[in-house]
Image: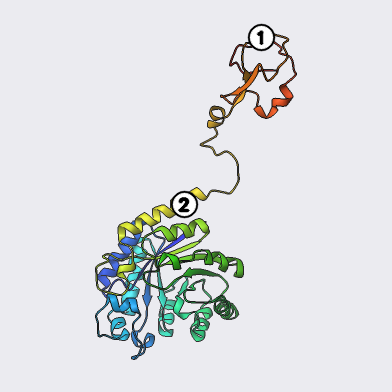
């Protein structure tokens, strides 16, 4: 099964449906399986007293609250219905993360195929229960969490109707320092909970998600933008369209390179066996009846004669005919 690649548009449309459609175009052109947005009602998501994260303060207008910032990034339910239709037209899967009950109900009404739970909701019991009641596949990010918190969230989802769950290892710092990416934690999630795992990446560049695929990720999620210099909280930590395309191409190459795990000569290298391996050959001219010894035998290329692994079986046998120097020995 191919790695499922989610191009995370998030809120990088800056509240403009025209930009959102351009992001869909870019995701499709890059070869992503899905493009994902974030669906929310600002007043249901953020309180008036909620502060911005440190990275948000650096990338958005100073003096505004988190609520003010989020309001500018909100699209209407009507907009999302239009974006879903646009995705169908472009033949790319539409996904969106809901952040409140009203948004969950809306996404269910437009028949979203799965629910993506963000890291910040992993301890939100009522939210998890509502998602689980939809009985759809769930992909859940696990940033900022301990194993016992992940376990509790999984228990809530399973007890309330969710059967298919994929866990994404994640670090929610934008951008994530490489020293904090901790990709091996993805394997810990897989081994501990016996589920499919993936990686939601916020590092700069494309190295970390490619490495995650090599480690066994089945889902990769990565933010992208049309322009990293646009105002907004996530643009600077996102890939541009060219980088997104490069990441997806690299992931597809790694998928092929991982192979089937069988240790045997590949189809492409089989012709090299006779060229690179060696055979037992005459070290000098040998006459019929002469005994084979270490003085008249040696090992050289090509490898289409008697294998040197039979060296001690050949020693002491007598030559059935004359052999010239470098000629392959025959019995």
Distance between the alpha carbons at the discs numbered 1 and 2: 52 Å
Residue 271 in view here: no
Q: Residue shown at 38%/56% (left/top)?
A: 247
- Residue 103: where, in percent of width, then height? 40, 81
Q: Are marks 1 and 2 in contact (CB under 8 Å)?
A: no
Kindly state the secondary structure of the residue where label 1 is placed: loop
The residue indicated by pointer 2 is: 254
In the depicted view, which residue is nearer to us: 264 or 277?
277
In the depicted view, which residue is nearer to us: 214 or 310?
310
Mark 1 surroundings within 10 Å by alpha-carbon count, few (fewer than 14), some (14 through 19), many (20 or more): some
Mark 2 surroundings within 10 Å by alpha-carbon count, few (fewer than 14), some (14 through 19), many (20 or more): some
- Residue 163: where, in percent of width, then height? 58, 72
Point out which mark residue 322 bears.
1
| Label 1 or label 2, whichever comes before in sequence order | 2
Image quadrant in which you'd find residue 159: bottom right
Report the side of 134 relative to 96 (left or right). right
């Amino acid at each position: 099964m191919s790695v499922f690649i989610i191009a995370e548009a998030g809120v990088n449309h800056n509240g403009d449906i025209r930009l959102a459609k351009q992001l869909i175009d870019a995701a499709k052109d890059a070869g992503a399986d899905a493009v994902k947005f974030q669906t929310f009602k600002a007043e249901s998501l953020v309180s008036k007293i909620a502060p911005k994260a440190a990275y948000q303060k650096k990338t958005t207008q100073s003096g505004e609250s988190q609520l003010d910032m989020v309001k500018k990034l909100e699209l209407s339910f009507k907009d999302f219905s239009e974006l879903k239709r646009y995705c169908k037209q472009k033949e790319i899967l539409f996904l969106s993360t809901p952040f409140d009950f009203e948004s969950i109900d809306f996404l269910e009404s437009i028949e979203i195929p799965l629910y993506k739970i963000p890291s910040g909701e992993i301890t939100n019991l009522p939210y998890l229960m509502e998602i689980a009641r939809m009985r759809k596949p769930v992909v859940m990010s696990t940033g900022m969490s301990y194993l016992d918190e992940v376990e509790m969230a999984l228990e809530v989802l399973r007890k309330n109707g969710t059967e298919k769950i994929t866990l994404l290892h994640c670090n929610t710092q934008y951008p994530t320092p490489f020293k904090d990416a901790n990709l091996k934690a993805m394997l810990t999630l897989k081994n501990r909970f016996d589920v499919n795992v993936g990686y939601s990446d916020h590092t700069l560049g494309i190295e970390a998600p490619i490495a995650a695929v090599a480690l066994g990720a089945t889902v990769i999620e990565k933010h992208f933008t049309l322009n990293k210099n646009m105002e907004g909280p996530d643009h600077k930590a996102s890939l541009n369209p060219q980088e997104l395309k490069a990441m997806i191409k690299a992931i597809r190459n790694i998928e092929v390179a991982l192979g089937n795990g069988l240790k045997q000569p590949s189809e492409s290298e089989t012709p090299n066996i006779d060229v690179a391996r060696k055979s037992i050959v005459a070290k000098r001219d040998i006459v019929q009846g002469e005994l084979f010894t270490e003085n008249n035998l040696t090992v050289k290329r090509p490898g289409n004669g008697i294998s040197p692994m039979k060296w001690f079986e050949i020693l002491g046998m007598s030559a059935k005919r004359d052999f010239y120097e470098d000629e392959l020995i025959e019995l």
